[in-house]
Amino acid sequence: YIGLFLSARQSDQTAPCHYAQFKVNPNCQLRVTASDFVLDHKIPVSALSTRDELMNPHNLLVCCRSCNIFKGTESYETIVKQKENNG
């Protein structure tokens, strides 16, 4: 998703909000632009203790601000399970 965002940024296009696929946030923007994206941590910052953990690109994803706020301090796995439970 970060690669998609960078490509979109250079071409004035949009990139998908990563959480849009789970359809758990009714306020999801679905797509983000260079001016309104957020980098979210799959494992919440509150659970990380080193700079390497904070900067690990495998723990980052691109999403809209609304989904970032919706997720809050929950883990990525919690959001995925919420989708599975809601069908």
Image: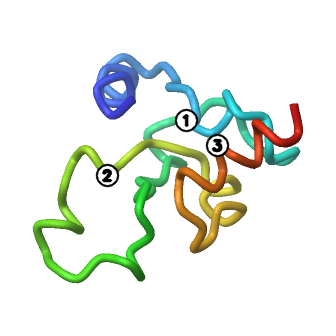
The residue wearing badge 3 is 80
What secondary structure is marked by label 2?
helix
- Image mark for residue 18: 1
For the residues labelled 2 and 3, the Cα–Cα distance comes to 15 Å
Q: In the rendered structure, which disc, 2 or 3, sits on the residue that comes first in sequence?
A: 2
Name which residue lies at 28% across and 26% down.
3
Q: In the rendered structure, which disc, 1 or 3, sits on the residue that comes first in sequence?
A: 1
The residue wearing badge 2 is 59
Q: In the rendered structure, which disc, 2 or 1, sits on the residue that comes first in sequence?
A: 1
> Which label sits in the foreground, 2 or 3?
3
> Which label sits in the foreground, 2 or 1?
2
As shown in the figure, which amino acid type bears the numbered disc 3?
A: Val
Assess whether mark 3 and mark 2 are in contact (beta carbons under 8 angstroms).
Answer: no
Name which residue lies at 38% across and 78% down.
47
Name which residue lies at 37% across and 22% down.
4
Front in this rendered view, residue 51 or 64: 51
**Residue 1 location, x and y as percent?**
39, 29
Q: For the residue carrying disc 2, how many other residues have a C-alpha within 10 Å: few (<14), some (14-19), or many (20+)?
A: some
Picture quadrant where residue 6 is located: top left
What secondary structure is marked by label 1?
helix
For the residues labelled 1 and 3, the Cα–Cα distance comes to 11 Å
Front in this rendered view, residue 17 or 34: 17
For the residues labelled 2 and 1, the Cα–Cα distance comes to 13 Å
What secondary structure is marked by label 3?
helix
**Residue 66 location, x and y as percent?**
70, 56
Q: Please say if 24 is above or below 6.
A: below
**Residue 59 location, x and y as percent?**
31, 52
